[in-house]
Amino acid sequence: MKITQREVARQLLNFDYVLLGAVICLSSLGLIMVMSASGIMAEKVFGDKYALFWKQAAFMVAGFGVLAVTARADMQFFYRHTYIWLILAAMLLLLTVFSPLSTKAGGASRWLRLGPVSIQPLEAAKIALVFYLSYFFANKQEMVKTFSVGFLPPILMTGALCLLLLLQPDFGGAVFLAALLFLMCLVGGTRIIFLGSAVMLAVVSAILLVVNSPYRFRRFFAFLDPFKDAQNSGYQLVQSLYGLGSGGWVGQGLGEGKQKLFFLPEAHNDFIMSVVGEELGFVGISFIVMLFGLVLWRTVAISIRQTSMHNRITAFGMGAILIIGGLLNMGVVLGAIPPKGVPMPFLSYGGSHLLAGFFCIGVLLNLSRKVKG
């Protein structure tokens, strides 16, 4: 079908430049903070204090390439292959458990190493789950209020992915997918009574998993009172709080933080927001929160203005991946929830979550050109 000049002009007008600007700011600030947080460690390990900075810069360039392609792609390509993406994601998760390609870190096999490249299948599973749930709810609206058709299939599908994550084990990843399922069921029209029952079942299951695992049990109670065992199970959280507390209103200055000097583990990764708080203070943290607020605002705006139910739920799900990730990361860094190893979208070091984040934004920008009016 030939696209007229008027249609091109309408798409350019509808293109969400605010969302794109917010993501450029977040990823650029993330690149700066990775350089600040990783320099000392990179110099000790690699002999080059810019080693991780250059890797993150390469991930960022690749991420913008993914964004550009996804923003211009035909969404029907992703929709037509919904079950293929789901099967591929499940296979990648299986490989982390049963394949020699998996690599262990912290007692868990969450990564696949393919030569010089490492990938985290959880990021692919998040996106595949969103495509599946949006397809499911868009095509089952007439039966979405029923238990056997409208509720049980997405629960079983998500539960299967969560089981594969627990085998790694990745309790935090399973919690992430469960939260994603809850939000998408909510907008998809699932009955509240079903959602309430599922939440109760999930809470009971989580309690049993914590009680029956000495490791999780220690981490949970360390979160409740990290200073009680500040040199062992509560060490990481205590150091994070020290960094945040010493930043004050405007911080100690970019590059002047002390916690990254081998006091705070994962300073350039999961706990990078502690470094932000220490070096840029309350002002820096607030600026990042406002940028994520813009991402949330534009996600909702793009979603509610879609003419297609499928597009509407897909847009919501892609934004939810980023917002849930940001909330969980901030919750861990602030000591509001137990440690889970969740990276901060666009800020933490790493390629898998960064590429996945840019993919989500690419889908949102793609759908922003298809809004009403």
Image (cartoon, rainbow, N blue to C red):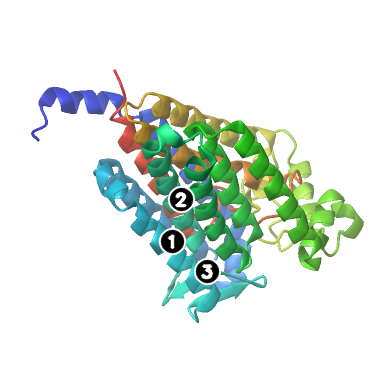
Measured Cα–Cα span from mark 2 to mark 3: 19 Å
| Residue at 45% in and 61% down | 54
Q: Earlier in the sequence, mark 2 or mark 1?
A: 1
Assign a secondary structure to mark 2: helix
Label 3 sits on residue: 111
Coordinates of residue 358 in the picture (x, y in percent):
41, 47
Q: Which of marks 2 and 3 is nearer the N terminus?
A: 3
Label 1 sits on residue: 89
Assign a secondary structure to mark 1: helix
Which mark is in front, 1 or 3?
Answer: 1
Coordinates of residue 238 in the picture (x, y in percent):
81, 53
Residue 35 as seen in the image, left or right of residue 5: right
Please indicate, yes or no, whether residue 159 appears anywhere in the rendered image.
yes
Q: Say what amino acid the circle numbered 1 marks.
A: Ala
Residue 154 as seen in the image, left or right of residue 84: right
Measured Cα–Cα span from mark 2 to mark 1: 9 Å
Measured Cα–Cα span from mark 1 to mark 3: 13 Å
Mark 2 Cα within 10 Å, few/some/many (few <14, many 20+)? many
Coordinates of residue 271 in the picture (x, y in percent):
66, 53
Name the mark on residue 129. Answer: 2
Question: What is the quadrant of the N terminus in the image?
Answer: top left
Coordinates of residue 33 in the picture (x, y in percent):
56, 49
Question: What is the quadrant of the C terminus in the image?
Answer: top left
Assign a secondary structure to mark 3: strand
Residue 198 as seen in the image, left or right of residue 363: right
**Toward which corner of the image does residue 103 lie, by quadrant?**
bottom right
Q: Say what amino acid the circle numbered 2 marks.
A: Leu
Judge by depth and name the residue closer to the eye, 196 or 76: 196
Which mark is in front, 2 or 3?
Answer: 2
Q: Say what amino acid the circle numbered 3 marks.
A: Trp
| Residue at 72% in and 48% down | 203
